[in-house]
Image (cartoon, rainbow, N blue to C red):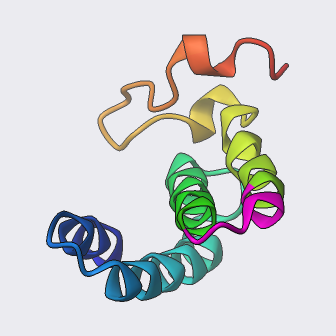
Amino acid sequence: MLYVLGNVRISQNELDEAYSLHKRALITWRKTYGEEHHKTGDAWHKKAWHEARLGKLEEARYVTTYAVISAKAKPEQRRSAKGVECVPKRFRQGFS
């Protein structure tokens, strides 16, 4: 819910609040799902987006590496509750 609300705040141009919500989502998902889950990867990616937006390009590049970890996860970790592949194959290529 925090992640989605953060995206809503981006669409409303409330970027500071969006960043705060996305950071909270990242903390929650790391504890709940672990580092190799696709949702955690999504949250790392959003953190990198915010860092780049703020001009912190080195931090954004560093944070992006954590997003890639989810793309390297085992197939069973990349599946949603419905069994659908969550990380597209084209994204995973080159990371194995």
Where residue 32 sits, quadrant-wise, is bottom right
**Direction from residue 35 to residue 53 in the image, left or right:** left
Instruction: Return the x and y of residue 82 as percentages of the image width and height.
Output: 29, 35
* Residue 2 on the magenta segment: no
Tell me if residue 9 comes above or below residue 92 in the rendering: below
Say which of 71 and 16 sits in front: 16
Single out the residue that lies furthest toward the front. Answer: 55
**What residue is drawn where x is 45% and y is 79%?**
19
**What residue is drawn where x is 39% and y is 86%?**
16
**What residue is drawn where x is 75% and y is 59%?**
57
Q: Quadrant of the C terminus?
A: top right
Q: Quadrant of the N terminus?
A: bottom left
Tell me if residue 79 comes above or below residue 94 in the rendering: below
**What residue is drawn where x is 72% and y is 59%?**
60
Say which of 17 and 88 sits in front: 17
**Direction from residue 4 to residue 49 in the image, left or right:** right
Instruction: Return the x and y of residue 55 as percentages of the image width and height.
Output: 65, 66
Which stretch did the figure color magenta?
54-60
Instruction: Return the x and y of residue 85 as percentages of the image width and height.
Output: 44, 25
Tell me if residue 37 comes above or below residue 94 in the rendering: below
Instruction: Return the x and y of residue 56 as percentages of the image width and height.
Output: 72, 68
